[in-house]
Image (tube, rainbow, N blue to C red):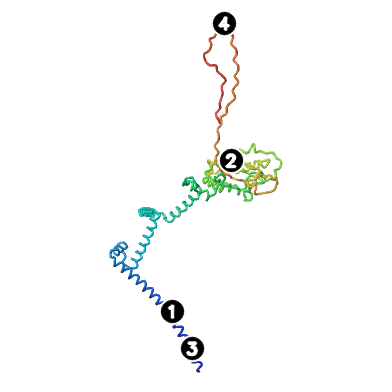
Amino acid sequence: MAEIMLLLVFCLLIVMATFLTTEQSKRVAAEEKLLQQQEQNQRDRDMVAALRRNSAVLEKLQAFSGLTDPKEIDKYWRELVDSQTAMADLQKIGVSVKEVRERLTDLEKLRSNGLDIDKALRDVDVVNAINRAMAKPGQPPPSTVDILSAIEKGMTGAGPSGHQWPPIIGLSEALGYTFKSGSAELSPAFHNTLISKTPNDILKYIKKYNVDVIEVVGHTDEQPIGMRPSNLDRDLLAVLKSTANVATLVPADNAGLGLARAVSVVSVLRQSSLLAGYKLIPLSGAQLVNTDETLAILGIPANVPERRRIEIRLRKSVPQETTASIAAEPILPKPRPLAKQPQQPRPPSLAPKAGPRQIVTPAN
């Protein structure tokens, strides 16, 4: 029985110790909070006392800020001190108070017009960084046009000699754009694509790159075509003008097959109103050009669908150089000698003798 009583007493002591520890922690926290509050109150009293000793300062602060709470007046005072310190630093580097006021007025005007001041400042930093990067010793700073051009080239990439070139639109048999074997006749799916989709793709690049010439190049692989007579000289133009069926074309070699297929594509594109007014030119690459634009000089007659393709290339017109052609001098017949008439001799002519003329034909 005595042991049980001792155990109970021990448990009660443990609970009491835990309770006292918790209460002590709460008391310490309350004392710390009270001490902080007392320190803050003392600072407030000191600040108010100092302000009361200088009633002029107090009146000015209250007038400028419209505040009565000592804490708010203290915050306002500290901001004034910080501002004064900042102005002193600006004056040390040569910036006057007048310049600061003018710049702040300008910023307010920009903000009232809906401009993002922070973004504008960041943009100025970026432009200054670009300016420093492009500046060359002994030369004037780059112009705004030069900076914008450099940014555009850096972001979009440039082609040879700094020019941007339109992409090549490739339509290969490997992608489903097929012809009949050895023929220039389009598959139905290829024909529908040339009517519904391809003109829009071409027009998009025409407007983006400001070009006006559409070159359609027909390519083949190196499989030879069997010996047969060709009718391209007779019927190619009729197919181009859509007055004859493309199925009637019979090429005799890969050069003719590439050209016939280019003409087949051009005859369809010419029907699109989107491409009216632009130059459409059919060309043949035959079996001589690989898909990576290298010459196919290995001479491997393999079945390669990727090489059996149509490529649409866009470029600007090349100004034609006019040349004058000079015709050869005509050979004039010699005049027949006149019969002598002694009784009436002809007086000598005062007019200059006519020489052979040069006939210049106008340029075509």
Question: Mark 3 and mark 2: span between their CA atoms?
Answer: 107 Å
Residue 266 — which label? none
Between 144 and 243, the residue placed more toward the observer is 144
Tell which circle, 3 or 2, labels the residue nearer the N-terminal end: 3
Tell which circle, 1 or 2, labels the residue nearer the N-terminal end: 1
Q: In which quarter of the image is the C terminus?
A: top right
Q: In this view, does 205 lie above or below 332?
A: below
In the rendering, at what x and y percent does residue 292 appear?
63, 47
Amino acid type, residue under disc 1 in the picture = Ser
Q: Is residue 334 visible?
A: yes
Whether tag 3 and tag 2 are in contact, CB under 8 A, the answer is no
Q: Which residue bears the numbered disc 2? A: 281
Q: Which residue bears the numbered disc 3? A: 10
Residue 342 — which label? 4
Mark closer to the observer (4, 3): 3
Between 95 and 68, the residue placed more toward the observer is 95
Question: Mark 1 and mark 2: span between their CA atoms?
Answer: 93 Å
Q: Is residue 300 left or right of residue 189?
A: right
Whether tag 4 and tag 3 are in contact, CB under 8 A, the answer is no
Q: Which residue bears the numbered disc 1? A: 25
Question: Mark 3 and mark 1: span between their CA atoms?
Answer: 23 Å
At horizontal 42% and vertical 77% (from top left) the residue drawn is 29
In the rendering, at what x and y percent does residue 230 appear?
67, 39
Between 192 and 286, the residue placed more toward the observer is 286
Q: In this view, does 183 lie above or below 98?
A: above
At horizontal 53% and vertical 16% (from top left) the residue drawn is 352
Q: In this view, does 229 lie above or below 358?
A: below
Question: Mark 1 and mark 4: span between their CA atoms?
Answer: 159 Å
